[in-house]
Image: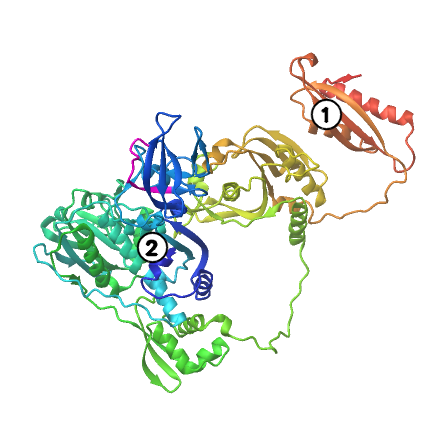
């Protein structure tokens, strides 16, 4: 959730730094995951000022240019060459001074420099609106109607807004803080500074020309329903201040009415919905359930089939207007033609909204709040604020009293607390007055005191505070975790130690090898998007482990492969100009084997991309390739004692366009390959990415009962011999290596290809491998006779098995 600092200050006076505020929010349970700087216009027009054209003469060396003298409030006038056809003496203009960086509406940014244009000095730039990101017109320079002094910063004239925006990781139990007012309430409690009261005293109906009847048929799913009508409005774009407020928290402005409902929801935490009042039959609202199979077209122009348990907002004829608390209907939505609206502010059952939201896969801001528990006492406050804003911004008249159907009042929670247990659980004796002060600032009322025991009345919006332990947690987070001293004598009389098992040792060893070679370990989310699998038909959607209560539509399944979550990290690094990437992760992959039966697979995944190493003055760098990762696979397996893995090439698999499989016997224990472009395009990655995946279960099974033997280093020298083999292109080096050890497994200690040559002169479909063979006898020095005999056996084997021609 995004929280604007400027917006927050409308509710509470804050006199602390951004860093202090970030720390305070985090320590009270509203963890700040990021802080961003928002500018309503990129660059905030820094270095741009209001200037006045004092003189304007024709350029001596160019017909379409003019030489101007501009007063920008400095001691000397600026000489500026301008090509705009409308520039003239006496105009107030926007001037970009030397050193200013401009961010045009289209294209890249650029810096203003002092220079000469056709021989005439130019000390700045007189700007058109598209050149500074204020519009699309390039017909001429902007001519301002202002009396502001020359030299006034342009951002003051254009009311450029700058803001600090906090990204808060809101936990599911803290829906009370899902608004700027809610966050301000928390800061009021912890900082003990005044909270500005919500004032709706200005609200009053202008007439009663459009009164609505409200009937709640399903009172369990809708416990309170409030509304008001406004007529004679003009639906248009929102004013700049409102658009900026929404843009700061990541919302796109739509129109003034819809923007106001969004603004009030993010301000007070109460979802609102605006209906086109003229499309509601008989000015009548009925809250009820429709039959299963009923179709309803929502605002996104999708026709949905309703379930009998979906709560609907209907008119008197039974026409569906809105899926209650989730999503509005296309037929009753606000458009440019709308002249009257009916504003809804309700309290819907969390269970009902959650179930409907899940059934239809609709994750809206309104559903987010309702399904966690909204504030039943905020409906009318929010309604009045929205009505006043609509009247102010869109015009019109408030044409009814507040309609409020509240069949059974929702009472505060009653909780009994012992101060002694509060102190015992916290681990510190906190004065009772301090505890009661904290509770009071949290709007938790002490209704009764019985010695050490308190009877509390907890407001309904604090759905997470219903037990004594919950109250203790509230006191502790406001009092401050860091205010609880740690006793010098605190200790433990039991320390548990257990030796690492073979599985942990294997992972540790693999990590050490990878880190030593420049890889970074990542930990990604096992939840991912099912959309990734749509472009990879090899992954069966029927095997997805679906998330029933998904946090968002982008996290709706458990991952079938680590490749996608890793590519998200790769893309993020590339977007932050970190193009040379070596990542690895130990994680699990999940599949549905059959209904209610699932499998988990432990995997080691690796990704490399970009250059093979950082730039160095004495060493050339190159692009990483498939062979770098394949070599890393060899190093990993040999590093944990698996010496007998063979390799088989493949053409295509679920994610790769080519690569190799590592096998022990007939069991595939790992795969290395290049990720195909279809998958890379999902993440807008343009550079090649290479991926490896090893089954940890299969890898570990090869060494669980393996006994390592150590032998003395041979006292006798090794011998190297080289051969050039002309063979068919389809024969891999792996086959050459395997056959070599099959022919000679006693003296042969190493086989390596050090050159590959392809040319038409070798023959059709032929290639040449230059291969080195290392021979060594641990018992004696090899003689030429033994060496020649061994090499002749190898040559004969290559000729007989693969039809090889030995190049002399």
Residue wearing tag 2: 368
Residue 283 in the image, given as x and y percentages of width and height: 11, 52
- Mark 1 and mark 2 in contact? Answer it, CB < 8 Å: no
- Does residue 48 belong to the magenta stretch? no
Which residue in the structure is indicated by mark 1?
A: 755
Q: Nearer the viewer, residue 47 or 120?
A: 120
Residue 370 visible in the current orientation: no
Left or right of residue 700, residue 424 in this image: left
Residue 53 is drawn in which quadrant? top left
Residue sitting farthest toward the bottom: 451
Q: Observer-nearest residue: 5 or 58?
A: 58
Element under disc 2: helix
Q: Earlier in the sequence, mark 1 or mark 2?
A: 2
Q: Position of residue 741 (x, y in %)?
A: 77, 31
Q: Is residue 93 visible?
A: yes
Q: Residue at x 76, y 21 (%)?
A: 724
Let me know if residue 91 is in the magenta part.
Answer: yes
Return the x and y of residue 69 as percentages of the image width and height. 36, 38
Q: Residues within 10 Å of mark 1 (few under 14, many from 20)?
A: few
Above-or-below relation of 13 to 790: below
Spatial CA distance of label 1 from label 2 is 62 Å
Picture quadrant of residue 122: top left
Q: Which mark is residue 184?
A: none
**Which SS type dominates the magenta stretch?**
loop
* Quadrant into which the C terminus falls: top right
Q: Residue at x 50, y 31 (%)?
A: 677
Q: Magenta residues?
A: 84-95
Looking at the image, residue 754 lies above or below residue 579: above
Quadrant of res 787: top right
């Amino acid at each position: 959730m995004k929280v604007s600092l400027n917006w927050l200050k409308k509710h509470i006076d804050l006199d602390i730094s951004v860093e202090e505020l970030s720390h305070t929010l985090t320590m009270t349970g509203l963890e700040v995951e990021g802080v961003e700087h928002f500018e309503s216009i990129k660059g905030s027009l820094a270095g741009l000022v209001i200037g006045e054209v004092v003189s304007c003469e024709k350029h001596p060396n160019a017909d379409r240019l003019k030489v101007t003298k501009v007063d920008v409030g400095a001691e000397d006038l600026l000489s500026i060459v301008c090509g705009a056809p409308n520039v003239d003496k006496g105009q107030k203009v926007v001037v970009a001074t030397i050193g200013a960086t401009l961010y045009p509406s289209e294209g890249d940014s650029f810096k203003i420099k002092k220079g000469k244009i056709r021989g005439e000095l130019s000390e700045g730039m007189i700007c058109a609106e598209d050149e500074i990101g204020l519009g699309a017109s390039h017909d001429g320079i902007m001519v301002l109607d202002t009396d502001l002094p020359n030299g006034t910063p342009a951002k003051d004239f254009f009311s450029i807004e700058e803001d600090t925006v906090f990204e808060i990781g809101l936990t599911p139990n803290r829906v009370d803080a899902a608004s700027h007012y809610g966050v301000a309430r928390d800061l009021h409690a912890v900082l003990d500074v005044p909270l500005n009261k919500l004032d709706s005293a200005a609200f009053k109906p202008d007439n009663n020309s459009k009164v609505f009847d409200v009937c709640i048929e399903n009172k369990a799913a809708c416990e309170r329903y409030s509304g008001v009508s406004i007529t004679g409005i003009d639906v248009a774009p929102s004013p700049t201040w409102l658009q900026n407020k929404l843009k700061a928290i990541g919302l796109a402005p739509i129109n003034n009415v819809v923007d106001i409902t969004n603004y009030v929801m993010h301000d007070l935490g109460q979802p609102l919905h605006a209906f086109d009042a003229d499309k509601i039959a008989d000015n009548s609202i009925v809250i009820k359930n429709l039959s299963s199979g009923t179709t309803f077209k929502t605002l996104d122009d999708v026709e949905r089939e309703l379930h009998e348990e979906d709560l609907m907002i209907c008119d008197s004829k039974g026409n569906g207007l809105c899926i209650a608390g989730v999503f509005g209907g296309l037929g009753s939505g606000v458009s440019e033609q709308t002249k009257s609206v009916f504003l809804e502010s309700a309290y819907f059952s969390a269970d009902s909204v959650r179930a409907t939201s899940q059934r239809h896969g609709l994750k809206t801001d309104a559903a987010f709040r309702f399904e966690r528990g909204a504030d039943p006492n905020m409906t009318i406050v929010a309604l009045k604020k929205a009505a006043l804003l609509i009247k102010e911004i869109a015009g019109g008249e408030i044409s009814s009293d507040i309609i409020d159907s509240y069949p059974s009042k929702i009472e505060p929670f009653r909780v009994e607390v012992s101060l002694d247990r509060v102190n015992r659980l916290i681990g510190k004796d906190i004065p009772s007055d301090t505890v009661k002060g904290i509770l009071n600032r949290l709007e938790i009322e002490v209704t009764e005191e019985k010695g050490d025991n308190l009877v509390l009345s907890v407001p309904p919006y604090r759905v997470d505070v219903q037990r004594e332990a919950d109250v203790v947690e509230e006191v502790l987070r406001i009092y401050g975790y860091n205010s609880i001293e740690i006793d010098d004598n605190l200790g433990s009389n039991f320390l548990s130690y257990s030796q690492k098992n073979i599985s942990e040792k294997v992972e540790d060893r693999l990590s050490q090898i990878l880190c030593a070679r420049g890889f970074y370990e990542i930990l990604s989310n096992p939840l991912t998007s099912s959309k990734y699998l749509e472009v990879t038909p090899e992954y069966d959607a029927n095997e997805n482990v679906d998330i029933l209560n998904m946090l968002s539509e982008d996290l709706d399944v458990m991952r079938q492969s680590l490749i996608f979550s890793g590519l998200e990290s790769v893309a993020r690094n590339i977007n932050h100009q970190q193009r040379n990437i070596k990542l690895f992760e130990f994680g699990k992959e999940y599949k549905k084997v059959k209904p209610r039966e699932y499998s988990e697979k432990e995997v080691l995944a690796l990704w490399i991309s970009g250059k093979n190493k950082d730039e160095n003055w004495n060493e050339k760098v190159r692009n990483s390739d498939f062979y770098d990762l394949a070599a890393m696979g060899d190093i990993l397996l040999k590093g944990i004692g698996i010496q007998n893995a063979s390799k088989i090439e493949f053409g295509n698999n679920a994610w790769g366009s080519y690569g190799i499989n590592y096998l022990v016997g007939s069991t595939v224990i790992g795969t290395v390959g290049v990720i195909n472009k279809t998958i890379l395009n999902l993440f807008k990655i343009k550079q090649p990415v290479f991926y490896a995946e090893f089954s940890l279960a299969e890898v570990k099974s090869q060494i669980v009962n393996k006994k390592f033997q150590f032998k003395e280093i041979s006292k006798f020298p090794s011998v190297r011999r080289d051969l050039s083999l002309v063979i068919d292109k389809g024969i891999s080096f792996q086959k050459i290596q395997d056959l070599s050890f099959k022919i000679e497994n006693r003296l042969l200690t190493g086989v390596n290809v050090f050159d590959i040559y392809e040319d038409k002169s070798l023959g059709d479909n032929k290639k040449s491998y230059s291969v080195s063979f290392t021979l060594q006898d641990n018992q004696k020095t090899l003689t030429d006779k033994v060496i020649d005999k061994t090499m002749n056996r190898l040559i004969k084997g290559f000729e007989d098995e693969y039809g090889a021609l030995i190049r002399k």
